[in-house]
Image: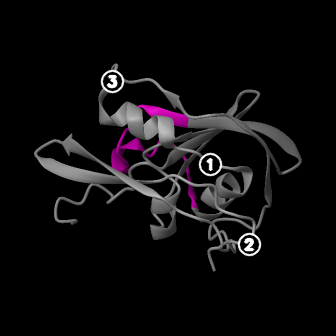
Amino acid sequence: MNCGIRTLSTAVFQIGTRTKALVLAVAMLSTCQPASPRPSSDQPVRVTRVEAAKYEGTVGGSEKAACDGWRLGTLQVEQFFRLSEPYGASPYGAFYQVPCSISGELQAEGRSWDFQIDGGATAIWTSGDETRYWGCSDQQCANLVLLATDLMDPDAP
């Protein structure tokens, strides 16, 4: 069930010799959207703050426009982490790098964590000296990020 309204815009990016279309869902999903169970952990995540997307790329272009339109609410960030898998180290080799991220704060495991979700479906949590890495390859994450992963499969559509 998806009770939210969704509008789509498309941007095309050249990635190596391949071109990927970026479909950006620009809408706040309502609270009636059911959450998927988190495959990696039973630990609940409660998001307490979400900031606007921050662009760190070159001036102008379709990436900046897509970043400016990317929005996630607290429920969407919680859904991203339920769908994501933890990694022992940065999983960037399997995910596209997008110069846009959404940051904020969450509570998990009795601790406060700062998070940053990259538009390419990776994320980090930091709390004190501890850093945790996440990546989301679940198909449902495609609606939550700017550029979903194909796990760098050259044969992926």
Disc tally is 3
Disc 2 to disc 1, how far (Cα)?
15 Å
Which element type, helix, strand or loop, lies under badge 3?
loop
Q: Quadrant of the N terminus?
A: bottom right
Q: Pick the residue in front: 2 or 129.
A: 2
Mark before the other along the chain sequence, 3 or 2 = 2
Disc 1 to disc 3, how far (Cα)?
22 Å
Label 1 sits on residue: 72
Identify the magenta region: 84-101
Which element type, helix, strand or loop, lies under badge 1?
loop
> Does the magenta run of residues contain 56?
no
The location of residue 10, given as percent across then percent down, is 33, 51
Which element type, helix, strand or loop, lies under badge 2?
loop
| Left/right of residue 49 with respect to residue 139 in the rendered view | right
Q: Which residue, as the protein is rendered here, is positioned at the far right?
A: 110
Label 3 sits on residue: 60
| Residue occupying the point 46% across, 43% down | 119
The location of residue 130, given as percent across then percent down, is 70, 34
Mark before the other along the chain sequence, 2 or 1 = 2
| Residue occupying the point 22% across, 65% down | 156
Q: Pick the residue in front: 63 or 119.
A: 63
Indicate the colouring scheme: one colour
| Left/right of residue 138 with respect to residue 111 in the rendered view | left
> Does the magenta run of residues contain 88?
yes
Q: Is residue 29 visible?
A: yes
Under mark 1, the amino acid is Leu
The location of residue 106, given as percent across then percent down, is 78, 44
Under mark 3, the amino acid is Gly
| Residue occupying the point 41% across, 31% down | 99
Label 2 sits on residue: 32
